[in-house]
Image (cartoon, grey):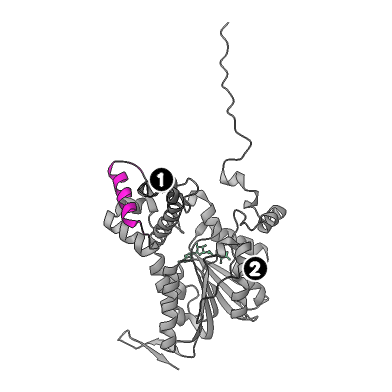
């Protein structure tokens, strides 16, 4: 008799494969104890973001009930939550984020904690348009914590990390603009090399750009995070073997950073934010900005210093503020953070009718 062919049951393994299955902490409210254990180990639980320099920010803002603030980069809402606590139910916090996926989750999480629309307004907007968040409103304090959140980095589907396979996307708002894989196809070798230098001071920019172009020219794909990481590694094959591993890792970090800055126009939107900022602050209003690489910090520093010389800001941070050593042990992602602050002076920026020129009036 013919034996019935039975399909061998596929071994699924004991470990969950998908990001969603893998991390219980993705639902932090449900798995509080797991989350606490991970935090104690100095790690960031998946699906969460640990806010940086919170005490320094709160001390500087000195938030009083009744004030109006803006969190320009809501993320997981860690900073927002602490600022809302300080408002004590009076006043208002506006918050913006370009990320439609995470900002909605955060809005719901904060609403469950009792921070509904009467005290918190969440807008899915680019902070470059900060004058449109609440037209006519002047803020007592504005916070911008630049870059990406841990949730965005840890989710392979967003393509922010070369450590896991995923589509080479890197957009903070996946519904707008073009993914990084498409940008790579569009840029010439010279443009790509220049972009790697400008956005990440990449020392091997020429070699990486040449390797990317060669792979694409030969019909090879660079559609995923791993494919780009392989290409970067291949470009550094001339390095002595004992230096290579570390150099590849750093070059991958810088390449991904440069592409992320490019697809999200990060320098342009930061520039527009800094330019509009004095116009939305009350006299005496305060701003704090957290940056994560030298290009961003340079822009913030230059803007604050230039506007202080013009009397628009009456005080600015003389030195950058760094998270404490203790905070960096607890949260290694804080290590590269630099904080700068400024206080709006009593001058108001006004446009001179017809000329478009800005004047400063007391
Ligand atoms: C470092 S995280 C902020 C974390 C947040 N402070 C917290 O406590 O959870 C940066 C966030 O800013 C958002 N973001 C980056 N650039 C933005 C922009 N131009 N406009 C609005 N949001 C932006 C990102 O989507 C991300 O959610």
* Image quarter of residue 304: bottom left
In terms of secondary structure, where does tag 2 sit? Answer: loop
Highlighted range, magenta? 202-221
Looking at the rendered image, the quarter that the C terminus falls into is bottom left
Q: Residues within 10 Å of mark 2 (few under 14, many from 20)?
A: many
Task: Say if disc 1 is inside 8 Å of ligand 1.
Answer: no
Image quadrant occupied by the N terminus: top right
Query: What crowding class fits label 1: few (fewer than 14 Cα within 10 Å), some (14-19), or many (20 or more)?
Result: some
Q: Nearer the viewer, residue 73 or 139?
A: 73
Where residue 288 sits in the image (x, y, percent)?
53, 76
Residue 153 in the magenta stretch? The answer is no
Which numbered marker is on residue 230?
A: 1
Q: Quadrant of residue 321?
A: bottom right
**Is tag 2's residue or tag 1's residue first in the polypeptide sequence?**
2
Please tell me which residue is depicted at 37% across the width and 60% down the height of the picture: 202
Q: Quadrant of residue 4 in the image?
A: top right
- Residue matched to label 2: 115
From the viewer's side, name the closer residue of 108 and 304. 304
The residue most toward the right is: 33
Q: Check the image and report above or below for 14 versus 108.
A: above
The nearer-to-camera label among 2 and 1 is: 1
Q: Which mark, by number, is residue 187? A: none
The question of residue 219 being in magenta is answered with: yes
Q: Secondary structure at mark 1?
A: helix
Give me the residue at 55% from left, 58% from top.
150
């Amino acid at each position: 008799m013919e034996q019935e062919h039975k399909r061998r049951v596929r071994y699924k393994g004991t470990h969950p494969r998908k990001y969603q299955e893998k991390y219980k902490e993705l639902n932090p409210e449900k798995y509080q104890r797991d989350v606490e254990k991970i935090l104690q180990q100095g790690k960031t639980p998946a699906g969460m973001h640990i806010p940086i320099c919170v005490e320094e920010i709160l001390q500087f803002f000195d938030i009083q009930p009744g004030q109006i603030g803006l969190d320009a980069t809501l993320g997981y809402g860690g900073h927002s939550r602490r600022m809302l606590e300080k408002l004590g139910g009076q006043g208002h916090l506006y918050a913006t984020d370009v990320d439609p996926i995470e900002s909605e989750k955060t809005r719901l999480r904060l609403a469950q904690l009792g921070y509904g629309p009467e005290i918190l307004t969440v807008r899915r907007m680019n902070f470059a348009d900060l004058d449109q968040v609440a037209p006519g409103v002047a803020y007592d304090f504005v916070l911008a914590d630049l870059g990406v959140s841990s949730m965005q980095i840890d989710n392979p589907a967003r393509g922010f990390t070369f450590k896991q396979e995923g589509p080479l996307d890197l957009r903070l708002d996946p519904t707008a603009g073009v993914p990084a894989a498409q940008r790579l196809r569009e840029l010439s070798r010279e443009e790509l090399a220049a972009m790697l230098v400008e956005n990440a001071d990449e020392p091997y920019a020429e070699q990486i750009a040449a390797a990317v172009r060669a792979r694409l020219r030969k019909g090879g794909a660079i559609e995923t995070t791993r494919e780009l990481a392989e290409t970067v590694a291949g470009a550094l094959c001339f390095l002595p073997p004992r230096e290579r591993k570390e150099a590849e890792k750093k070059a991958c970090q810088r390449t991904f950073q440069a592409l992320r800055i490019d697809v999200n126009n990060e320098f342009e939107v930061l520039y527009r934010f800094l330019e509009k900022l004095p116009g939305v602050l009350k006299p005496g209003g305060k701003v704090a900005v957290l940056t994560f690489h030298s290009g961003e910090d340079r822009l913030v520093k230059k803007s604050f210093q230039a506007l202080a010389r013009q009397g628009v800001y009456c005080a600015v941070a003389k030195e950058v503020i760094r998270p404490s050593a203790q905070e960096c042990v607890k949260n290694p992602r804080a290590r590269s953070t630099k904080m700068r602050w400024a206080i709006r002076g009593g001058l108001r920026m006004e446009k001179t009718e017809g000329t478009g020129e800005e004047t400063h009036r007391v």
